[in-house]
Amino acid sequence: AEELTPSTENGVQALLVRAELAVRQGDVASARDALAGIRPRILRTSPAFESRRLLCEVGLLLLEEDPHGARRRAAEAQELAARQRAYASGIDDPPCSPIY
């Protein structure tokens, strides 16, 4: 089995999931530690990885009571999603319908 370290793709994916979970739980230190292990702006195998990383940072910045930093990071995530013709949930709330 592949070890989950930042030197492997699966390890980086796991770090993002850990960061997202820590943000949801309000655990600033764990979220910051997990995000610190992820090199930003690197092409990953997971769709929308960088947008998810940026949105996770938005959540962390809000937990750290930095609304200006969160707003800047959210704008960066929105710009990236627009360039990729992707939809970043919660940023501009376009109408959508689920695909089953």
Image: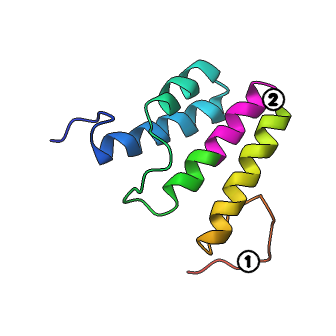
- For the rendered model, the colour scheme is rainbow
Tell me residue 56's x, y (percent): 62, 42
Q: What range is drawn magenta here? A: 55-66
| Residue 61 to residue 98: above or below | above
In the rendered image, residue 57 lying in the magenta stretch gets the answer: yes
x%, y% of residue 75? 76, 53
- Residue farthest along the right direction in this orientation: 68
Circle 2/circle 1 CB separation < 8 Å: no
Residue 96's tag is 1
The local secondary structure at tag 2 comes to loop
Q: Which residue is mark 2?
A: 66
Q: Nearer the viewer, residue 54 or 98?
A: 54
**Mark 2 crowdedness (10 Å alpha carbons): few <14, some 14-19, many ≥20:** few
The label number, if any, that marks residue 48 in the structure image: none
Residue drawn 40% across and 46% down? Answer: 13
Which circle, 2 or 1, is nearer the viewer?
2
Looking at the picture, how far across and down is residue 82, in whole percent? 68, 70
Q: Quadrant of the N terminus?
A: top left
- In the figure, 86 relative to 42: above or below? below
Q: Quadrant of residue 80?
A: bottom right
Depicted 25 relative to depicted 59: above or below:
above
Task: Provide the major secondary structure of the magenta segment.
Answer: helix
Q: Give the side of residue 14 with respect to residue 91, left or right.
A: left
Question: The residue under label 2 is which amino acid type?
Answer: Asp
Quarter of the image for residue 63 reads top right
Q: Quick check: 91 left or right of 3?
A: right
Residue 66 vs residue 96, the one in the foreground: 66
- For badge 1, the amino acid type reads Cys
Measuring 43% from the left and 36% from the top, which residue is drawn there?
15
Residue at disc 1, secondary structure: loop
Residue at 70% x, 53% y is 76
